[in-house]
Image (spheres, grey):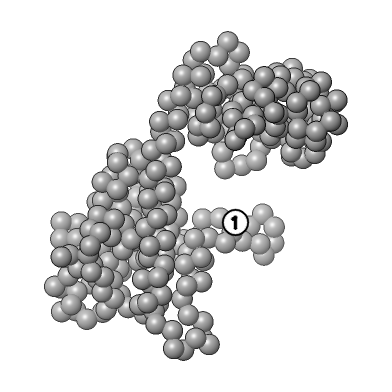
Amino acid sequence: MKTIVTHNGKFHADDLFAVAALRLIFPHADIARTRDEKHIERADCAVDVGGMYDEKKDRFDHHQSAGAGKRPNGIPYASFGLVWKKYGENISGSRESALNIDREFVETIDAEDNGIGLSNPVFKDVYPFTLPDVVSLFTPTWKEKEADYDQLFLKILPAAQEIIRRLAAKEEARREGEKMVEAAYLKAADKRLLILDEGYSWKRKAAVYPEPLFVVSPEGDKWRVSAVRDDVHTFVNRKDLPSSWAGKRDQELATLSGVPDAIFCHNNLFVAVSESKEGAIQLAKLAIDNTEYV
């Protein structure tokens, strides 16, 4: 049976998710939290402790004076990133998926663990509540003097494992779905409008092409028309839905748009919903032909 060792005492997202990733590779491994050097030496895997990075020996510490290397973009590796670099492809199913998960998830944890901020507040004194902040909720407050760090670590560990599983599943589905988005783009008569028959992950793929303005796709038993954005991390649409639709619902929206089964348009003009696919397509075409933003 494998043994995974990490440090005892307070834990962070870095060591938690590093152990979670290893536990997906070695599901029956024992987990020990200690700084005892003899115990660390005997362990099969050592995470965030031991003063050594050696992938071949499953030693994944980054606290040594020289660190454990940086990514091409300059973000240093922390223990989670080191584990993911070796085992991410095995966990996620492909090299491409592993790289995408590293860029979108693992890097953010590694950066924070290395004291690197990744966001600037848009509003004064309002900051994102990050995943490391969530993990910190599971460490004791100064008032909880009898709390057991080891038990709290093991309590949240299954959730960390499930997050990694879901990341892998979402990434696989995204990659498969983007092939369908590409097919829809290639066959579209008017490439300003992409029509999808499933709820594929389309935002990143649609942004690759210069023409698409709106995407029609199912949402439960309804259909939605969504605005395309050049940068999926912003809220700037290539083209907004008509401003007169903002916040309108049901009969009022149906009357304004002329689409009988239109049922909702968001105040920020990035999504509208209809009862039918035909209604959503009609809304999208009206939005494409709308000239108020020209």
Q: Which residue is mark 1?
A: 120
Q: Nearer the viewer, residue 84 or 147?
A: 147
Q: Nearer the viewer, residue 168 or 34?
A: 168
Please state if 165 lies on the left or on the right of 89 as rendered.
Answer: right
In the image, residue 55 lies at what x, y percent?
Answer: 19, 57
Q: Residue furthest top?
A: 189
- Position of residue 110 relative to residue 96, above or below, is below
Which amino acid is tagged 1?
Answer: Asn
**Toward which corner of the image does residue 266 lie, by quadrant?**
top right
Q: Quadrant of residue 20?
A: bottom left
Quarter that holds the N terminus: bottom left
In depth, the one of 75 and 100 nearer the eye is: 100
Seen at 23% across and 58% down, the residue is 26
Query: Looking at the image, which residue is at 49% across and 15% down?
Result: 186
Q: In this image, 17 relative to 180: left or right?
A: left
- Give the residue at x 52% y 28%: 198
Q: Quadrant of the C terminus?
A: top right
Neighbours of disc 1 within 10 Å: few (<14), some (14-19), many (20+): few
Q: Quadrant of residue 277?
A: top right
Residue 118 or residue 194, whichever sits in front: 194
**Residue at the limit of the structure toward the front, as seen here:** 221
Confirm whether residue 195 shows in the render.
yes
Residue 240: give x, y in percent of width and height. 72, 30
Count of numbered badges drawn on the protein: 1
Query: Which residue is drawn at the image coordinates 51% and 55% (left, top)?
Result: 118
The answer to whether residue 82 is seen in the rendering is no
Residue 73 sits above or below residue 61 on the image: above
Q: Is residue 243 above or below residue 145?
A: above
Helix, strand or loop under label 1: loop
Tell whether 232 sits left or right of 122.
left
Check the image and report above or below for 165 versus 294: below
